[in-house]
Amino acid sequence: MGLPKLNTVDGAVELNLYGDLSYPLLGTATGGVTLSGAVASITTVDLSGLTAGVVTTGTGSLTLTKATSVKVGSLPVSVTLAEATNG
């Protein structure tokens, strides 16, 4: 899932999605980006343009057990990407 024109969010973003997530133009999410819902089914994440805001799936953590490619600007303290081969 992607939304190519999403560039800036003045606050937090919650993406309750599954599968492939592609938002490479999102540069700012001052409150961070939370991936929720079916996170176990997320296979790729591209938030490569994110320069402000941390990507998480829970409090202080990013856990994506099936994701093979994860591109994010900032990481939380705890990261678990068991299947990641590209990042």
Image: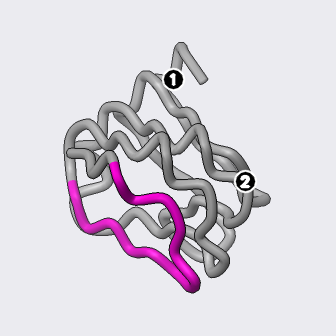
Q: How many marks?
A: 2
Which is nearer the eye, 27 or 74?
27
Q: Position of residue 49 (x, y in %)?
A: 61, 43
User: In screen coordinates, is 50 left or right of 22?
Assistant: right
* Magenta highlight: main SS: loop
Residue lying at the far top of the rendered structure: 85
Name the secondary structure under disc 1: loop
Q: Pick whichever, 77 or 16, lies toward us.
A: 16
Which is nearer the N-term, disc 2 or disc 1? 2
The residue shown at (56%, 34%) is 71
| Most distant residue in the right direction | 77
**Within the magenta stretch, is there residue 9?**
yes
User: Tag 2: residue type?
Assistant: Thr
Q: Taking 16 as reference, is 3 above or below it?
A: above
Residue 58 vs residue 46, the one in the foreground: 46
**Element type at mark 2:** loop
Q: Residue at x 40, y 63 (%)?
A: 35
User: Which residue in the protein does label 2 denote?
Assistant: 51
Q: x and y percent of residue 2 in the render?
A: 26, 46
Q: CA distance from mark 2 to mark 1?
A: 21 Å
- Residue tagged by mark 1? 84
In reply to whether residue 22 is colored magenta, the answer given is: no
- 30 relative to 28, above or below: below
Quadrant showing the N terminus:
top left
Range shown magenta: 5-17
Q: Which x, y percent locates residue 9?
A: 51, 75
Q: Nearer the viewer, mark 2 or mark 1?
A: 2
Would you call the spot at circle 2 few (<14 residues within 10 Å), some (14-19), or many (20 or more)?
A: some
- Check contact, mark 2 vs mark 1: CB within 8 A: no
Q: At x 69% / y 46%, what residue is drawn?
A: 73
